[in-house]
Amino acid sequence: MTDDEILAEFRAAEALLSGHFLLSSGRHSTHYLQCARVLMDTDRAGRIAVALAQKLPRELRASIDLVVSPAMGGVIIGHEMGRALGKPAIFVERPTGTFELRRGFSIPAGAKVLLVEDVVTTGLSSREAMATIEAEGGQVIAAASIVDRSAGSVDLGVPYTALIALNFPTYAPDELPAELAAIPATKPGSRAKP
């Protein structure tokens, strides 16, 4: 998929939002990508996962044992990536604020894991999920996401592949432009406010 085709998928799903948004990272933005809307269409979710899987180097795809994603945003794309790669897919979740395995999921010792997210901005969720995976005995060998919002600055310590990079400006709470500060912020993400 080209960048234009990917953006067309977001537009068709009415998933590229404009306004004042408080991101999971604690930063503010005039744009928000509601990946859940893009992924609610199962055919579209499958196309996006196949396109992302195809961006991974062949030798990396062959070495993956397990796909793990953080709940909530990563669950659907993680599942679809598992399907695209022919690998099992599980997720970690934060019932008490810290990622953990639940629902009878386990990671075999030494399993080579691909971490899959919907959007990466600062990499905080990814690094937290990776720490949990490694504590459970897995080895994270790469990470992937639909969207990289980090402006290419995120370093997860493993190879990272994104389907598309979208770099809308983000602002710390004390750096808000006047026109953005005048609009009430909405929090469309799944993580509690930092």
Image (spheres, helix red, strand yellow):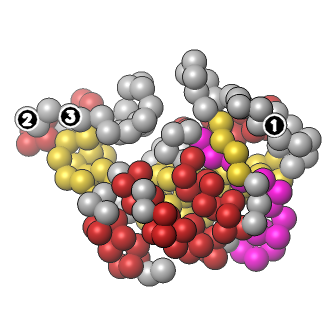
For the point 42% across and 56% down, the residue is 40
Cα gap from disc 1 to disc 3, whole angstroms? 38 Å
Q: Which residue is mark 1?
A: 106
For the point 56% across and 39% down, the residue is 71
For the point 87% across and 49% down, the residue is 111
- Residue 50 screen position, x and y as percent: 59, 73
- Residue 1 screen position, x and y as percent: 48, 80
| Mark 1 neighbour density, 10 Å: few (under 14) some (14–19) many (20 or more) | some
The reply to whether the magenta stretch includes residue 58 is: yes
Can I make out residue 91 in this image?
yes
The reply to whether the magenta stretch includes residue 69 is: yes
Q: Nearer the viewer, mark 2 or mark 3?
A: 3
Task: Say if mark 1 contacts mark 2, CB within 8 Å.
Answer: no
Residue 2 falls left or right of residue 85: left
Q: Nearer the viewer, mark 1 or mark 2?
A: 1
Which amino acid lies under the numbered mark 3 shown in the image of this protein?
Answer: Ala
Is residue 29 or residue 84 the one in the foreground? 84
Q: Which residue is mark 2?
A: 182
Which amino acid lies under the numbered mark 1 shown in the image of this protein?
Answer: Ser
Q: Which residue is mark 3?
A: 185
The secondary element bearing badge 2 is classed as loop
